[in-house]
Amino acid sequence: MAFASRAFLKSVEGKVFLNNKWVTPASKAVSSLYNPYDNSLVSSAHAIGNQHDVDTAVSSARTAFHGPWSKFTGGQRGAVLNKFADLLDANAEEAAFYESICSGRVRSQLKYEVPFISSIIRYYAGWSDKIEGDVLSDDADGFYKIIRREALGVCAGITPWNGPLMVFALKAAPALATGNTFILKPPEKSPLSSLFAASLLPAAGLPEGVLNVVTGDGSTGAMLASHMKVDMVSFTGSVPTGKKIADAANNSNMKRCALELGGKSPALVFPDANIKKAIPELVRGITQNAGQVCVASSRVYVHEDIADELIAGIKAGFEAISVGEDPQDPSTTFGPVVDPVQYQKVNEFIEKGKTEATLVTGGEKYEKGGSYVTPTVFKITDANAAVYKQEIFGPVLVVRTFKTEEEAVDMANDSEFGLAAYLWTEDHRRILRVTKQLQAGHIGVNAGVALFPTAPFGGYKSSGVGKEMGKLALQDYTNVKSIYIR
Ligand code: NAD
């Protein structure tokens, strides 16, 4: 493939994206990027932006917000976003390559995901000229009242490595649709797809400074979260980092904060479920992206009457997965975790799991090179087991049995997280009852992991604050102003 020469990468190495140009940052600090397939070096010059670089990006975004971007009509903003989506589609293979090369994400999945990301951008392009206010009906108090919905100003997006291109779109598209300017801090482990997408924006007609990218690690992200001239920060990542970002936002200028955080999402399988349909979805739900999916169905609760059959089916599904294949090969469906740090973390969970739960399959450490983790299933009897309680973010599934619906719901809700939940049953009354009781923001019934541009997505409890996708996301990026005229 032409882009195997990595010409784009060579042209942006060590640079940040400011005012529609790749420029050398003030900071001299760099980090290295690796391919987790074989831990080979991808780049040794990934810039770590410093305070000066962040200040420059904020100042350029502020100038653009009050300048050319404020002169764009909603329809014109929508046209830019539509063109951006078209360019992403036209360059989908290259975008997928740069998403995959440092994350290990498999190309077979990205083939569908990049067009889905374009559809998210188009969805928000459609909203650009439909951001409406209101005029309140005359209630004879002598006041004429106008309700305006306005852009916030400069928004920052801080994104994780497990799906960086999609999360970039989930934040930048509604931010730009509503007239804000935007600064992205992509993940330090897998930033290249975000850089590649940003490089398409000038050709889409985006004015200078409307979207800037400052690369870096958590220190660069922290500078954005605490910046006095950033009006909003939208973060996707882990719960501990989310808490730091909320603190930084509160302790600086009380900027608005949207948080999409971690999960340990339950899947409840009732005796009346279609087990043949459930099994492949439950296998996919925790092995897709090597289990590094915030909405992964990582806890399965199965009724004791069907437990043996379901566990045998899941075990067979896990054992059919081929470990160690190249993510760039179009037939590969299971890739490595993102890096040796994550490999070590997940393997430590597995070792601990062997002492606190019953190993059903997997468990052995993959040691043939590359950050692959053997897909592993544990049967749980101790509800305090670390593998059962904590988000592992790897291909590790825990299964627990239940006797009654009430017990299943209680066990599913007994978690600090509330991102997603899944339900397998053919009983429609049970669907209504249980979906009402489950404390999660995103519930699939007789379906595995799925996202829709039109449906709001966001967690309950420690899994987050705010919504992405759907029209509700527009609220996170706008302020409402009441004007009363006598
Ligand atoms: P992370 O929290 O370690 O890092 C996420 C981003 O935050 C990175 O860009 C990082 O550089 C930055 N960061 C780190 N410290 C920071 C600080 N103090 N201030 C500002 N920014 C800082 O998360 P990760 O390991 O990259 O991603 C995995 C986590 O993300 C998992 O918990 C997963 O569940 C979660 N996630 C959630 C969703 C969702 O939509 N709810 C989606 C994807 C991932």
Image (tube, grey):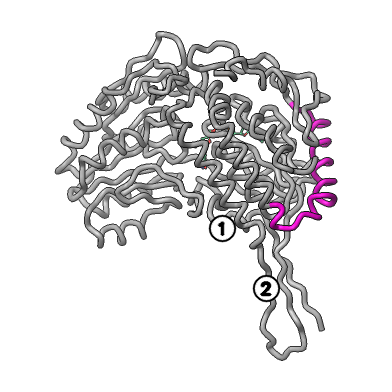
Q: Quadrant of residue 291?
A: top left
Magenta-drawn segment: 49-77
Residue behind mark 2: 134
The crowd level at tag 2 (other Cα within 10 Å; few <14, some 14-19, many 20+) is few
Is 53 included in the stretch rendered in magenta? yes
Residue named by callout 1:
471
Type of amino acid under label 1: Lys
Q: Could you say where residue 40 lies in the image, as x and y percent from the top left?
A: 55, 11
Circle 1: element type: loop
Q: Position of residue 472 (x, y in %)?
A: 56, 58
Position of the N terminus, as image quadrant, is: top right
Magenta stretch, main secondary structure class: helix
How far apart are the two marked residues, 2 and 1, measured between alpha carbons? 17 Å
Q: Residue 164 colored magenta? A: no
Which residue is at 69% across, 17% downward?
A: 10
Residue 283 in the image, given as x and y percentages of width and height: 31, 33
For the residue pair 112 and 256, the one nearer the viewer reads as 112
Depth order, front residue of 180/344: 180
| Ligand 1 shown in quarter | top right
Dots 2, 1 in contact, CB < 8 A? no
